[in-house]
Image (tube, grey):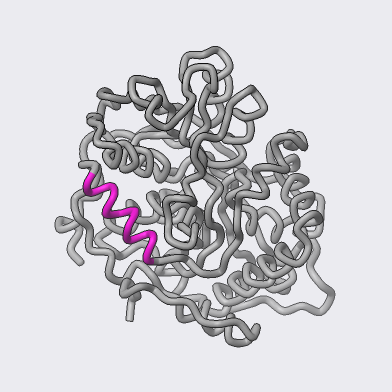
């Protein structure tokens, strides 16, 4: 697919993607996550996979990346990689993780659907593949109950989203259009004022009443509730079976071709981690919070952690049909030229792992590479 046929984002989002990357330690793009737990332990007599000294894994310090957090904390990635060291980098924004993947600073990453679509189409379909799912749900519209008592009261109010054109921004713009209201996607002005605000500062903005609510992922949503907010809408209620992709696993196409055994090891660790999370939800919640504290220096308090964890569902299925729908929503909002997503998925190795684990295969919804 030629790159000229798939301009993903118009001027506003392109400008965002061109912002300077986060200032950073590990690989030039992300912060090196602190170790000191099972993720650093290599079993005696273990062998390197594909002759690799290391596999570099990227993820966000969000509960929606629970598989990566728990898999790291429990040492599952390192166990499956044997003597090949699992190295990690954490990110705060999709564009910086995509840039790290494209430059070879990381090999595999956990990331949201919009950055994955962006990275795939901007490269003309040459730089990455989605190779698995990780999480569904965990996105809510939280409002000031003194100002907004019903969904119709959202009209005329200031509602934050994490950034122009990101997954939650697109979802909120699509919801607004469904109400029959008008908003200019680029400026955020209209029947609702859409305020693009980093998740780190949104709770303070809510507390100071400079915004009336926010359409945000966890744990930001639960942080707003802890500040007196009310959940007005859970995005999962808008989707069939209440499932929609919030986090995927992506890999550099170059790395996938050269090191399929290493990719298989990481995917096997992901599948086994998700199975462990479902069987041990409380222990998994604690492990995720421990890793968040190791990465950022601060754990989530129980009043934030508990409701946030309950709204997220880990999954091996990338829920490909919902990614296609999310892309359509961005097109309708005027943020995306209709993309050709054929080939964005390669689920061959994941389905091999699932079969070996006695689980059902997953489907690419017509968007597979073969």
Residue 331 shown in magenta: yes
Residue depicted at x 20% and y 67%: 1
Image quadrant where residue 352 sits? bottom right
275 vs 223: above or below: below
Is residue 224 toward the left or the right of residue 293 in the image? Answer: left
Farthest-out residue, left: 4
Near-viewer residue (12 or 146): 146
Residue 51: say if magenta: no
Question: Visible in this render: residue 4?
Answer: yes
Q: Nearer the viewer, residue 8 or 260?
A: 8
Please tell me which residue lies in front, 344 or 360: 360
Residue at x 27% of width, y 57% of height: 121
Of the 4 image quadrants, the one containing the C terminus is: bottom left
> Where are the magenta residues, as a range?
321-332
**Residue 57 coordinates in the image, percent (x, y):** 58, 58
Residue 22 drawn at (x, y percent): 49, 35
| Quarter of the figure with residue 221 | top right
Residue 273 sits in which quadrant? bottom right
Q: Is the residue 347 above or below the residue 97 in the image?
A: below
Q: Main secondary structure of the magenta part?
A: helix
Residue 28 visible to the viewer: no
Q: Tell how many labels.
A: 0
Q: Position of residue 124 (x, y in %)?
A: 24, 61
Residue 117 location, x and y as percent?
Answer: 34, 55
Say whether residue 170 is left or right of residue 136. Answer: left
Q: Residue furthest right?
A: 44
- Residue drawn where x is 33% and y is 76% of the image: 369
146 or 332: nearer the eye?
A: 146
């Amino acid at each position: 697919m030629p790159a000229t046929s798939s301009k993903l984002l118009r001027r506003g989002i392109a400008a965002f993607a061109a912002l300077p990357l986060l200032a950073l330690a590990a690989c030039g793009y992300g912060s090196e996550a602190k170790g000191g737990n099972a993720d650093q332990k290599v079993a005696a007599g273990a062998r390197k996979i594909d002759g690799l000294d290391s596999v570099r894994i990227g993820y966000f310090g969000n509960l929606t990346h629970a598989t990566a957090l728990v898999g790291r904390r429990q040492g599952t990635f390192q166990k499956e990689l044997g003597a090949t060291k699992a190295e990690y980098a954490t990110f705060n924004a999709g564009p910086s993780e995509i840039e790290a993947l494209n430059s070879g600073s990381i090999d595999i990453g956990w990331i949201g659907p919009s950055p994955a679509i962006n990275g795939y189409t901007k490269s003309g379909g040459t730089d990455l593949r989605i190779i698995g799912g990780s999480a569904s749900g965990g996105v809510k519209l939280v409002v000031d109950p003194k100002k907004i008592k019903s969904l119709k009261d959202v009209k005329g109010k200031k509602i934050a989203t994490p950034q122009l054109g990101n997954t939650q921004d697109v979802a909120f713009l699509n919801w607004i259009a469904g109400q029959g209201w008008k908003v200019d996607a680029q400026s955020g002005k209209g029947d609702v004022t859409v305020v693009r605000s980093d998740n780190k500062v949104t709770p303070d903005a809510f507390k100071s009443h400079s915004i009336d609510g926010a359409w945000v992922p966890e744990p930001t949503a639960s942080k707003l509730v802890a500040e007196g907010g009310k959940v007005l809408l859970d995005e999962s209620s808008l989707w069939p079976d209440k499932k929609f992709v919030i986090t995927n696993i992506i890999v550099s196409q170059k790395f996938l071709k050269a090191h399929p055994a290493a990719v298989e090891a990481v995917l096997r660790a992901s599948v086994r981690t998700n199975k462990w999370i479902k069987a041990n939800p409380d222990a998994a919640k604690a492990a995720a919070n421990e890793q968040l504290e190791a990465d950022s220096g601060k754990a989530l308090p129980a009043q934030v952690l508990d409701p946030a964890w309950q709204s997220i569902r880990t999954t091996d299925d990338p829920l490909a049909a919902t990614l296609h729908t999310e892309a359509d929503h961005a097109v309708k909002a005027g943020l995306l030229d209709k993309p050709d997503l054929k080939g964005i998925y390669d689920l061959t190795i994941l389905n091999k792992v699932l079969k070996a684990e006695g689980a059902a295969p997953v489907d690419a919804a017509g968007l597979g590479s073969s």
